[in-house]
Image: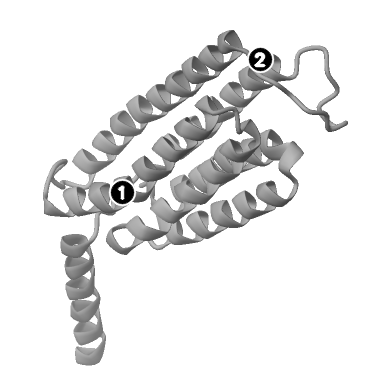
Amino acid sequence: MEKEKYLQDLEEIKDIMNRSSRFISLSGLSGIFAGIFALGGAYAAYRTIYVNQDYLSYSRTLLDSDSLFKLLLIAVATIALSVITGIYFTTRETKRNNQKIWDYQTKRLLINFAIPLVSGGLLCLILLIRGYVGLVAPLTLVFYGLSLVNASKYTLNEIRSLGIAEIVLGLLAAYFIGFGLLFWSVGFGVLHIVYGILMHMRYSK
């Protein structure tokens, strides 16, 4: 009996230490909605880039300034919707777990997540403006995956697995350069939805 109580006390101490060193209030619902928005954005990008073309039959695609502007708007709208819903559901989860929304752990998580993400985003923007459209989808997947892996030290371990999967998809998209949008849809859409469902089932009370 005393041994069981001792083991229970150790588990409680371990849980407290884990909560103090990691941000554990990520919401699975935010992942699900981010995936849905990504699929919507991918479809809108497809309609913008591959008008009157068969996507599965690879052909060279050139973007004019109007199409480029539309792609930027689609990207901004997709990111904005994902961030807004992410903040909403994560804030709700944080309050439910009786944690502070903004503390040292949150800052560490965001900084380590943002450094690769912002660097990759700026590089992709430069490539998009210069007309290297085919490289944008693979690089966004790779840099996003690196951001997740880098931030996983300060949050749930599942984030690392998601990041590695995104990196692998990005490398495959770079090899199959004509089908980047398809890999992008799987990475940012399908994987986010699957991840969100698993996280919601595992951690939501």
Q: Residue furthest front?
A: 130
Inspect the image, locate mark 2, and give the three-letter code of the amino acid beneath it: Thr
Inspect the image, locate mark 1, and give the three-letter code of the amino acid beneath it: Ile
| Disc 1: CA contacts within 10 A as few (<14), some (14-19) or many (>=20) | some
Q: For the residue labelled by badge 1, is the local secondary structure a helix, a strand or a loop?
A: helix
Residue drawn at the location 76% of the way across and 13% of the way down: 51
Q: Is residue 22 left or right of residue 159?
A: left
Distance, label 1 to label 2, CA atoms, is 30 Å
The part of the image, by quadrant, that contains residue 63 is top right
Q: Which residue is mark 2?
A: 48
The part of the image, by quadrant, that contains residue 200 is top left
Badge number at residue 4: none
Tell me the quarter of the image containing the N terminus: bottom left
Q: Position of residue 108 (x, y in %)?
A: 20, 54
Q: Nearer the viewer, residue 173 or 84?
A: 173
Q: Nearer the viewer, residue 69 or 187?
A: 69
Q: Which residue is mark 1?
A: 115
Looking at the image, residue 157 lies above or below residue 185? below
Numbered marks: total: 2
Residue drawn at the location 31% of the way across and 48% of the way down: 115
**Disc nearer the start of the sequence (1/2):** 2
| Disc 2: CA contacts within 10 A as few (<14), some (14-19) or many (>=20) | some
Q: For the residue labelled by badge 2, is the local secondary structure a helix, a strand or a loop?
A: helix
The part of the image, by quadrant, that contains residue 5 is bottom left
Q: Nearer the viewer, residue 113 or 200?
A: 113
Looking at the image, residue 173 lies above or below residue 30? below
